[in-house]
Amino acid sequence: MNADLIISILSIALVAGTSLVFATIGEIITERSGILNLGVEGIMIMGAVIGFAAAFHSESAWIGVVVAMLVGGLLGFVHAFLTITLRAEQVVTGLALTIMGTGLASFLGQELGPEGGALVGLTGPRFTEISIPILSEIPIIGPIVFNQDILVYLMYVVVIAATYFLYHTRSGLHLRAIGESPQTADAMGVDVFRLRYLYTIVGGMLIGLGGAHLSLAYTPGWSENLTGGRGWIVIALVIFASWNPWRAVVGALLFGGVNAIQFRMQASSTDIAIPATLLNMMPYLLTVVIAVLTTWMQRFNKLIGAPAALGLPYNREERH
Amino acid sequence: MPDTSAPIAVEMRGITKRFPGVLANHKVDFAVRVGEIHALLGENGAGKSTLMSVLCGLYQQDEGKILLAQKRELSPVQIHSPSDAFDLGIGMIHQHFKLIPTQTVAENMILGLKDTPFNLQMTAIENRIRDLADRYRLEVDPRAYIWQLSVGERQRVEILKVLYRGANILILDEPTAVLTPQEADELGAVMRNMASEGKALIFISHKLDEIMAFADRVTVLRSGENVATVEVSNSSKTELAQLMVGRPVLFTIEKPPSQLGDVVVAMEKVSALNDKGLPALDNVSLEIRSGEIVGIAGVAGNGQRELAEVVTGLRPTTTGRITIRNRDMTHQPPYQFIQQGVAHVPGDRLGMGLAGNLPVSDNMIMKSYNREPISSGIFLRNQMIRTFAQNLVKAFQVLTPNLETPARNLSGGNQQKAILAREITAGKNLTKGDEPPFLVTVYPTRGLDVGAIETVRRELLEQRAQGVAILLISEQLDELLALSDRIAVLHGGEIMGIVDAAEADIEHLGLMMAGELHI
Ligand SMILES: Nc1ncnc2c1ncn2[C@@H]1O[C@H](COP(=O)(O)OP(=O)(O)OP(=O)(O)O)[C@@H](O)[C@H]1O
Ligand SMILES: [Mg+2]
């Protein structure tokens, strides 16, 4: 393999991984607060379709991003209302959100185009690569890391900000506390109810942003089943990342890499004939492998487990 | 000695608090003075924790008001949440620790504090904690993770946490229940120190000796009502116990001579590992006969828990042999132990003893669900379950609003009685009365009031009289001396010696517990 090929694969890995990073960090923030949101797939695909439609009609990719985040936040709010206020079962609510989201997205894909037509096959505004002067000239790293679309750069900022927020700020401490032990946090004067709402909504916004990156940058345009199960990979990535933003990047790049290789192999039908269906299976196979590995690792380290109160509703006047 | 004319720090008037089916507090009046240690005494379920949870904003009272000394004047305050309470200088150390195991001491300390800067400066915070710790002599490393700390250290963190928030009124809910006697004495000194600095302390305990030693006044609650507030110096243990239970309480119980039968359980050179995979039991050999109570003494963490788990089949052994009535049980699963009539009252009530979210009735049948008359074939018989549970609740005086109440809503003492009821009955039923069952009890009276302790101890002696073989693990020497026939001392997972309880010498036991004497 020559250097160009490696650079090209890694570069695709990074873009392919970006939407995963946004969504994974969003889900990490939500789960850290103790709320399990299995609606990732539904929120991502809604963000993708509505984000693309908004960009298409406004002729601005940025408006698409903002609208996608608002949709994500709205769906996060729905999840929060059902699970926090009504104390509905979180797994069921999340699954319902995914089923509703995928169905609604494919319906909207038929309706939101020009004159109430379909969105499929249209080309709209998109984010293109911007190479950063000087930095992009660094050998190997430059073209991979600093020659990307602006949402990838935004992703760098989100990762650093999320890490700093989680481990070095007062609010981050509170976020970690409400997911570990809402009773304790509550007794110490942290408003568990309000914060769980907040972080479920913020998480939803980032997941929506992940969806928008698909339809506005990585594979611009709308097509049926655009997310292709990425939402489920995100759920696995959160576990792989042990609820830690930095590790989420590593995991997302790994998946992006698999995606990129898949891409190349399909494109340049080499002499080794691997059926496309087998290639398509790879991300999910990797998910299973990762789930097994992480569970095994967590047996040896107390600090990398799930937030202790993940998935449990909280009610102050009830004994625990 | 306290100043009886000292001003009131906080007063609760006519507090009533109801839970579904329970009147937890009924028109309670309660006042604490500045610089005083005020004990709150009452049976399990009397409503002590509930009253204090109202004061610290965790629960909202249905009736009544709270008055607080502000600028030398007593004025009504509204406390809607724990953070309101903190703002008013009221801090509570809960019966069940409120700490986050995966965070550090310092992080736990500043949780919920509004005036910490957004960007956390941990070094400054850690230094402040060290200063505070020095001042009140509460040693603890601010950088340690909570899960690495012993129970005594966690307690200190809890107290520091409240002090760190500048509380003037401190509520300590059964702080000594999980401490060793030495640690409890140290805590007493710390409390006195705080009181002398002008803080008001409310101290809940079931241990009358501690109340007599540390407190200035006592308020006694019975069935959610304030029955008396008395000066400790004008009262006595007997009077307090009688006020609280409503009848005279015997502190010493009659132990009839033992009727020893055959060996029920025998352990031969058994070794086992703890959860971290380190050696926890080292060549333990022990025999327990029918009609005998063998006590296990030792400082907590010296293999007691592992011992209980090994003899109930919950923990695998690495070497050695366990037999029950001459049947080899080594490496058998817990189910087989249960079938042999092994009953287990674990130390961790809600973790291992009860399924907290299930109703009392379901908890009661957990060891009898697969037999007539509770079930027939694969079907459960609800009517039978009700009768069965009802009988146990009655026989063991378990205080519960009804059989459908989730077990976690029972007070600590009643949870304990419920487990005891289930285990004793199951052990009997499984051996069909032909052969003596084997009962393992771990800290059976921890957190119980004197009345409940009496009931539990009586019940254990009653079982002994009926020929049950009993292994009693306890951290209280007086309990071991009162109930056991023989006492084995565990230290570092090794049995340092087995002595006859009647001839036991407390000093010798202490030396063995410290690992300095091996007989
Ligand atoms: N959150 C709750 N929901 C329902 N019932 C409750 C709740 N908290 C307490 N109770 C009930 O209120 C009564 C008083 O309980 P409380 O915990 O105040 O007793 P306590 O005096 O602290 O007992 P203990 O000495 O065992 O700690 C009990 O009957 C208990 O079952
Ligand atoms: Mg209590």
Image (cartoon, coloured by chain):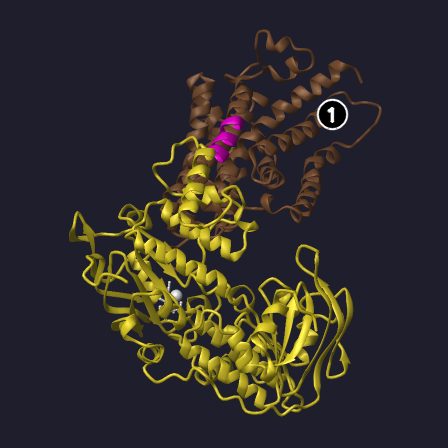
Q: Is residue A106 above or below residue B321?
A: above
Kindly tell me whether residue B270 is visible in this rendering.
Answer: yes
> The N terminus of chain B is located in which quarter?
bottom left
Q: Is residue B274 above or below residue A166?
A: below
Give the residue at x 30% y 69%. B218
Residue at the extreme right of the image, as rendered:
A271
Asked whether B116 or A308 is in front, the reply is B116
Residue that carries the numbered disc 1 in the rendered image: A266
Q: Is residue B12 above or below residue B162?
A: below
Asked whether A188 or A128 is in front, the reply is A188
Overall secondary structure of the magenta stretch? helix
Segment tinted magenta in the rendering: A159-168
Q: In the displayed structure, does residue A277 sit left or right of residue A131?
A: right
Residue B24: within the magenta?
A: no
Give the residue at x 32% y 49%. B167
Chain identifier of the residue bearing label 1 in the image: A
Q: Amino acid at mark 1?
A: Gln
Which chain is brown in the rendering? Answer: A
Asked whether A142 or B165 is in front, the reply is B165
Kindly tell me whether residue A114 is visible in this rendering.
Answer: no
Give the residue at x 16% y 53%. B75
State the hue of chain B.
yellow
Residue A163: within the magenta?
A: yes
SS assignment at label 1: helix
At which x and y percent is residue B412?
44, 69
Q: Is residue A168 above or below residue B519?
A: above
Quarter of the view holding residue A172: top left
At which x and y percent is residue B344?
60, 74
Asked whether B223 or A291 is in front, the reply is B223
At which x and y percent is residue A78?
41, 42
At which x and y percent is residue A166?
49, 35
> The C terminus of chain B is located in which quarter?
bottom right
